Image (cartoon, helix red, strand yellow):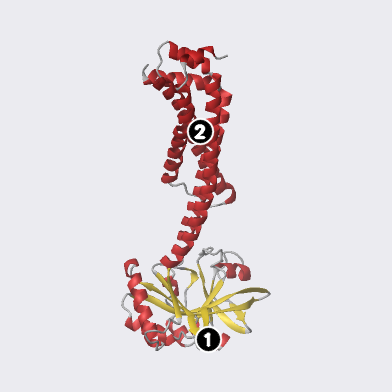
Amino acid sequence: MSPVMTCRIALKALARNKMRTALTMLGMIIGVSAVITLVALGKGAQKAIEDQIKSAGTNLININAGNFTANGVRGGVGAASNLTVDDVVAIKSEVPGVEYITPMVNSRAQVIAGNQNWATRIQGVDVDWPLIRDWPVKYGAFFATQDVTGAAKVAVLGKTVSDQLFGADVDPTGQIIRVRNQPFKVIGEMSSKGQASMAEDQDDIIFTPYTTVQKKLTGQQNIQNITLSATSADATTDVKDAVASVLRTQHKLIANDPDDFTIRTQEDIADLRTQSTQTTTNLLTGIAAVSLLVGGIGIMNIMLVSVTERTREIGIRMAIGARGSDVLLQFLVEAVVISLLGGGIGIALGFGMAESMTRLWQWPTQVPGSAVGMAFGFAAMVGVFFGFYPAKKAAGLDPIVALRYE
């Protein structure tokens, strides 16, 4: 018997029991759709994290005070006050490949404008800050070098702060706000940046010259962070290493002394967060794959029942000339068709569920082609693996015994 005729017989056998075929496919449909949906959620989350980190700036390198050990006590990021403006000057003059650089001094305060007030972050930076972050000004302008030199009481508002104090889409330029009872003139408003990768509102902030924060608000001499950007993405690693060398020299650290600072690039941060997301995605995908296993066992059970029910039919076919290989192929085709059809429906359902989550709940999703291929291929393997035993059992029946079967 030709393979084509055997396949036609297998498809007719499935069509005769439409309800049982549909219920058998259900396990594959659920398993494949679960795999597609969870992979889409995981990949979407990874892409969202990467996009948010990229939005922080191009070729960004962050230097934080801390990461030292003293008298057996280890201090982490922010545990020391050993970064200074002299470090910034040294990096700028000695490290090739640094395009922009700014010291950073952070504080929090209740800001008052008229009868409105708002608690927010006050971030002291230098004039390079919007260039490092690729963050344009919406209204007015960013402060200039003379404002930094003179520790001028000027402020550039983030969109959230501006909306809270002056209303949405209102140009706050020229307004006066009070920060810790000191008047600051608003000279601009930044364009909206949105949420950061840790769900922090990047627009809930006020920028002032770092010298102003040091002299007028906090009284501190040190700086908390240094942020810089390399001239190109390829230069980021070399710049990072050169900055570390300059800082060790600046801080008079000898060969065996640990760094008293921490340097992170955007790639480092992205790798840490995407690795965490990937681990979660793999775990969820593994759990979903159990559904495929259960679906495969369901296929095997139904096919075994089908062999028992059709024992007499198998005996008749073999008595009129069908070979064992023909019967084996027929039942194997039935199992594979159930798996592939269920896999196809599951893939479509998975795409639909991922799209629904994006539309209804704004969850980022992304279905990679590899996930579709993996799910479909796995469905085919499940059909072959779990369909082989029932098919072999059917092919091994004795025609005489099968004909006597009632």
Residue 339 location in percent, x, y? 48, 32
| Depth check, front residue: 255 or 196 | 255
- Sequence-earlier tag: 2 or 1: 1
Verify CB contact (< 8 Å) between mark 2 and mark 1.
no
Foreground: disc 2 or disc 1: 2
On the question of residue 73 being in view, the answer is yes
Determine whether the residue tagged by mark 2 lies in a helix, strand or loop: helix
Residue 292 point in image, percent of width and height: 52, 40
Q: Is residue 393 above or below residue 258?
A: above
Question: In the depicted view, which residue is nearer to us: 346 or 216?
Answer: 346
Which label is found at residue 214? 1
The answer to which quarter of the image holds residue 268 is: bottom left
Identify residue type, mark 1.
Gln
**The quarter of the displayed image where residue 333 is located:** top left
Residue 21 visible (yes or no): no
Which residue: 58% across, 67% down? 160
Name the mark on residue 342.
2
For label 2, count other residues whose C-alpha is less than 10 Å away and answer few (under 14), some (14-19) or many (20+). many
- Indicate the amino acid at tag 2: Gly
Residue 175 lies left or right of residue 146; in this view the side is right
Question: Which image quarter holds the C terminus?
Answer: top right
Tell me the crowding category of disc 1: few under 14, some 14 to 19, or many 20 or more residues within 10 angstroms, Cα based. Answer: some
Q: Residue 118 versus residue 34: which sits nearer the camera?
A: 34
**Residue 244, placed above or below residue 377:** below
Q: CA distance from mark 2 to mark 1?
A: 66 Å
Could you tell me residue 207's position as x and y percent?
A: 52, 76
Residue 2, horizontal then vertical, whole percent: 36, 18
| Nearer to us in this view, 143 or 359 | 359
Q: Is residue 387 left or right of residue 325?
A: right
